[in-house]
Image (cartoon, helix red, strand yellow):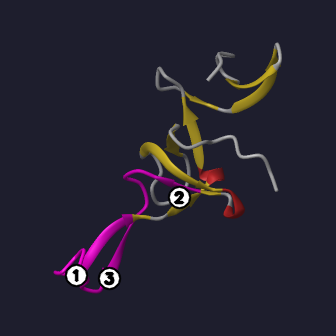
Amino acid sequence: MTKLKIKSGDTVKVIAGDNKGQQGTVQKVLKDKNKAIVEGVNLVSKHQKPSAANPQGGIVKQEAAIHISNLTLLTSNGDETRVGYRVEGDKKVRFSKKSNEVI
């Protein structure tokens, strides 16, 4: 299994596919599938049966997973960057390869 460099809570931008150019916050990372669920990106329609929680039922929009390779991390100032790892002291930290700052 490969090391995923995008984590929950990161702000990312979609760089390929139907949702190219959209950005959002990562809600969940699916490590076994190399995919992530990003808030407000890759919305799909799901037909939902009426239940106690949703008595009306109907068609519901929800986020679907998108492959990690189609995402790039956005830094605090909004620049797209790749992620690297390095050891500082006794801690392993993520850093921006573009600006060389710790994320």
Q: Earlier in the sequence, mark 3 or mark 2?
A: 2
Q: Residues within 10 Å of mark 1 (few under 14, many from 20)?
A: few
Q: Which residue is depicted at the point 31% across and 82% down?
A: 48
Percent across and percent down for residue 51 are: 26, 83
Query: Range of the magenta residues?
Result: 36-62
Helix, strand, or loop for circle 2?
Answer: loop
Gap between marks 2 and 1, in whole Å? 30 Å
Asked whether the beta carbons under mark 2 and mark 1 sit within 8 Å of each other, the answer is no
> What amino acid type should be assigned to the residue bearing mark 1?
Gly
Q: Residues within 10 Å of mark 2 (few under 14, many from 20)?
A: few
The image quarter containing residue 52 is: bottom left
Determine which residue is flagged by label 3: 47
Q: Residues within 10 Å of mark 3 (few under 14, many from 20)?
A: few
Determine which residue is flagged by label 1: 57
Task: Please give the label number shown on residue 17.
Answer: 2
The image quarter containing residue 19 is: bottom left
Percent across and percent down for residue 31 are: 68, 57
* In this picture, residue 59 sits left or right of residue 94: left
> What amino acid type should be assigned to the residue bearing mark 3?
His
Gap between marks 3 and 2, in whole Å? 24 Å
